[in-house]
Image (cartoon, rainbow, N blue to C red):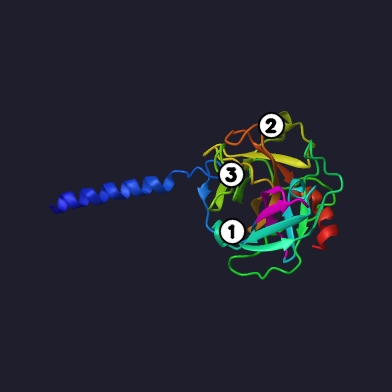
């Protein structure tokens, strides 16, 4: 093989390698495999009869996991997985203590926020750590996140519309906040308690098993959980904006539960 042919072969291999890296893996729904995100929590929630499902949450302290009220109401036990981007390597902690917002409405998703209290404190490491909460805003004005702001979501939820179980790997997607008018038209929700966000680049979206995951944005350079995945439109795989609970609106309630 001549040096000219060898250089051509190397160029072809490099091109194919770059293409393979940039293609989305069909998880989260058109998301990408994610490195470990230390604040992420997988949540298995169970009834007294040991039936249930799974969702996601966000570590906000050594004792507290922020999540959707849908993952709490009607259930009596929670298994929280932390510390890895590989499902089988998660460290599991069982809890029988959780609280949801007292005015949560399952049918409208209003006040869709809850907190799981862990029986033993987490040990924070490079792989397990909390994310910041938004500041308390007593005036409830200019609440985070802002329109067109981009946030990160990660989860172990279904990876296609026909999935029946969790993803083996943690998946990541990026959503950008839509206008309030788009959100109201889709969900008729109660602003400012909620906001909507979408991925108009990759068309990624959350799916079953991702409800409760955090929408994390940078606030003055600090990763901050500003939303909680609450509801999707129609079926997994659609490209309609996802509905999120606006965390800052409930900052006072979070403090009343956690003292944070």
Tell me if I can see residue 115 in this picture.
Answer: yes
Q: Nearer the viewer, mark 3 or mark 1?
A: 3
Quadrant position of residue 124: bottom right
Disc 3, SS? loop
- Residue, disc 1: 37
Q: What is the C-alpha distance between the residues marked 3 and 1?
A: 18 Å
Residue at the top extreme, as displayed: 185
Disc 3 + disc 1, Cβ < 8 Å: no
Tell me if I can see residue 85 in this picture.
Answer: no
- Residue, disc 2: 182
Image location (x, y in percent) of residue 125? 61, 70
- N-terminal of the pair, mark 2 or mark 3, is 3
Mark 1: give few (<14), some (14-19) or many (20+) Cα within 10 Å.
many
Query: Residue 158: which numbered mark, if any?
Result: 3
Image location (x, y in percent) of residue 2? 12, 52
Which of the two residues, 144 or 24, is positioned nearer the viewer here?
Answer: 24
**Image: magenta residue range:** 42-61
Is residue 44 magenta-colored? yes
Mark 2: give few (<14), some (14-19) or many (20+) Cα within 10 Å.
some
- N-terminal of the pair, mark 1 or mark 2, is 1
């Amino acid at each position: 093989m001549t040096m000219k042919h060898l250089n051509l072969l190397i160029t072809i291999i490099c091109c194919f390698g770059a293409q393979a890296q940039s293609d989305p893996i069909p998880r989260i729904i058109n998301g990408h495999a994610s490195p470990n995100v230390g604040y992420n929590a997988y949540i298995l929630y169970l009834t007294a009869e040991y039936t249930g499902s799974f969702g996601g949450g966000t570590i906000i302290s050594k004792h507290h996991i922020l999540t959707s009220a849908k993952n709490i109401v009607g259930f009596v036990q929670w298994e929280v997985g932390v510390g890895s981007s590989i499902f089988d390597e998660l460290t599991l902690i069982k809890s029988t203590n959780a609280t949801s917002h007292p005015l949560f409405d399952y049918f409208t998703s209003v006040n869709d926020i809850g907190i799981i209290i862990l029986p033993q404190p987490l040990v924070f490491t490079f792989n397990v750590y909390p994310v910041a909460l938004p500041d308390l805003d007593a005036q409830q004005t200019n609440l985070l996140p802002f329109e067109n702001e981009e946030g990160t979501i990660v989860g172990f939820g279904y990876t296609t519309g026909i999935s029946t179980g969790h993803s083996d790997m943690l998946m990541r997607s990026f959503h950008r906040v839509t206008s309030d008018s788009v959100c109201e038209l889709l969900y008729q929700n109660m602003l400012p308690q909620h906001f909507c966000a979408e991925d108009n680049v990759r068309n990624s979206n959350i799916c079953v098993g991702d409800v409760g995951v955090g929408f994390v944005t940078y606030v003055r350079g600090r990763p901050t959980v500003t939303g909680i995945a609450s509801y999707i439109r129609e079926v997994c795989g659609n490209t309609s904006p996802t509905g999120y609970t606006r965390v800052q609106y409930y900052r006072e309630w979070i403090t009343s539960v956690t003292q944070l």
